Image: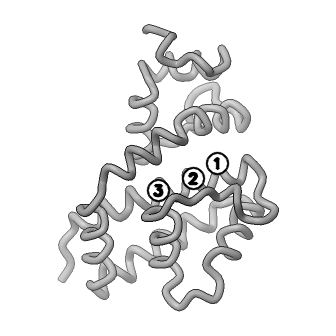
Amino acid sequence: MNLKNLSGLSSKAINICRRENFKNKQDIVEFVFNGGDIYSLKGASLISGNEIYGFIKKDLKLYEAHLGKTFLNNVKSIFSNEVKRELFIGDIESRQKNLSARAKNALINLITNQPEKWEYFINQTINEEFSFSDIKNVGKGASLELDKFRSYVVKLISEYSNKEFA
């Protein structure tokens, strides 16, 4: 593996990436975008996981941005179908329960008092340039955790847009 493609990471983070055969940022981005969890990789700790997420953060946003119109149409198709909408929201809220207290509080502060809170979340944090670190009292760890949550929501949108419900 050419370690120059992963320059900027600590040796521990590089070793984690090497074990997973990640050759560059794009490999890591695709892993996360497809639902992979950096923290569950062999040898990953909270610190090294946060480091790797921080390393790919910008690239992950660019990757998500390439979804463009297809992404917006997928969101519309989910929220216009009552069954898809309810199942989609159930999945998001189930995943939300796994967030740390600080990340949960930041998310609640963001979507509270919004009539369509998950549509608002998608519009504010995915369709627009948004940084969770701009929310009051959100630390680096919670910000990275919310970035991961956002990626999970993007993945769910892709999955639900391809499902057919009666």
Taking the image as shown, residue 62 lies to the left or right of residue 132, namely left
Q: Is residue 119 above or below residue 48?
A: below
**Image mark for residue 152:** 3
Could you tell me how far apart the alpha carbons at marks 1 and 2 are, in whole angstroms? 5 Å
| Lower position in the chain sequence, tag 3 or tag 2 | 2
Q: Amino acid at mark 3?
A: Tyr
Secondary structure found at label 1: helix
Depth check, mark 1 against mark 3: the one in front is 1
Q: Quadrant of residue 164?
A: bottom left
Taking the image as shown, residue 41 lies to the left or right of residue 67, namely right
Q: In the image, what residue occupies the spot 70% across and 60% down?
A: 134
Residue furthest out toward the top: 2
Could you tell me how far apart the alpha carbons at marks 1 and 3 are, in whole angstroms? 12 Å
The location of residue 46, given as percent across then percent down, is: 71, 38
Which quarter of the figure is the C terminus placed in?
A: bottom left
Q: What residue does disc 2 label?
A: 147
The count of marks equals: 3
| Lower position in the chain sequence, tag 1 or tag 3 | 1
Taking the image as shown, residue 104 lies to the left or right of residue 72, namely right
The location of residue 84, given as percent across then percent down, is: 31, 78
**Image mark for residue 144:** 1
Q: In the image, what residue occupies the spot 43% across and 64% down?
A: 127
Q: In the image, what residue occupies the spot 54% across and 41% down?
A: 57
